[in-house]
Image: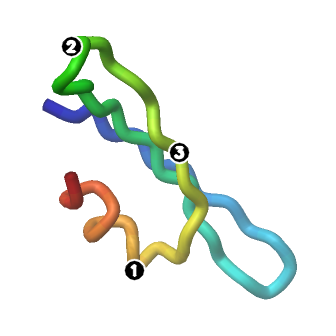
Amino acid sequence: MAKKSVASIQTGSKRLTKAVKMVKSEKTGAYTFVEQIMTPEDVNNFLNKK
């Protein structure tokens, strides 16, 4: 189960996106947040990856 949040960021001539997903730890069962800044084309790959 992952929670998705995506925000667009513009820096100069590049268009970047910050994606945040919530990942459940199999060891402890606690949730952690994983954040990454990438191009908009890479967002779906990041959110679908475990």
Residue type, mark 1 in image: Glu
Q: What is the count of numbered marks?
A: 3
Query: Closer to the observer: label 2 or label 3?
Result: 2
Q: Residues within 10 Å of mark 2 (few under 14, many from 20)?
A: few
* Dot 2 or dot 3, earlier in sequence: 2
Describe residue 16's horizontal placement relative to residue 26 as left or right. right
Marking on residue 18: none
Query: Closer to the observer: label 2 or label 1?
Result: 2
Q: Residue at x 19, y 59 (%)?
A: 48
Image position of 17 with respect to 32: above or below: below
Query: Which residue is identified by label 2?
Result: 29
Query: Which residue is identified by label 3?
Result: 35
Q: Element type at marker 1?
A: helix
Point out residue 23 in the picture as x, y percentages from the top left corner: 29, 32
Q: Work out whether residue 29 or residue 37 is closer to the camera in this orientation and state it.
A: 29
* Dot 1 or dot 3, earlier in sequence: 3
Q: Residue furthest right?
A: 12
Q: Element type at marker 2?
A: loop
Gap between marks 2 and 1 measured at Cα: 31 Å
Q: Residue furthest front?
A: 27
Query: Which residue is identified by label 1?
Result: 41
Q: Work out whether residue 50 or residue 38 is closer to the camera in this orientation and state it.
A: 50
Q: Residue at x 47, y 51 (%)?
A: 19
Q: Quadrant where the N terminus lies?
A: top left
Gap between marks 2 and 3 measured at Cα: 19 Å
Point out residue 29 in the picture as x, y percentages from the top left corner: 21, 13
Image position of 43 with respect to 6: above or below: below
* Dot 2 or dot 1, earlier in sequence: 2
Residue type, mark 2 in image: Gly
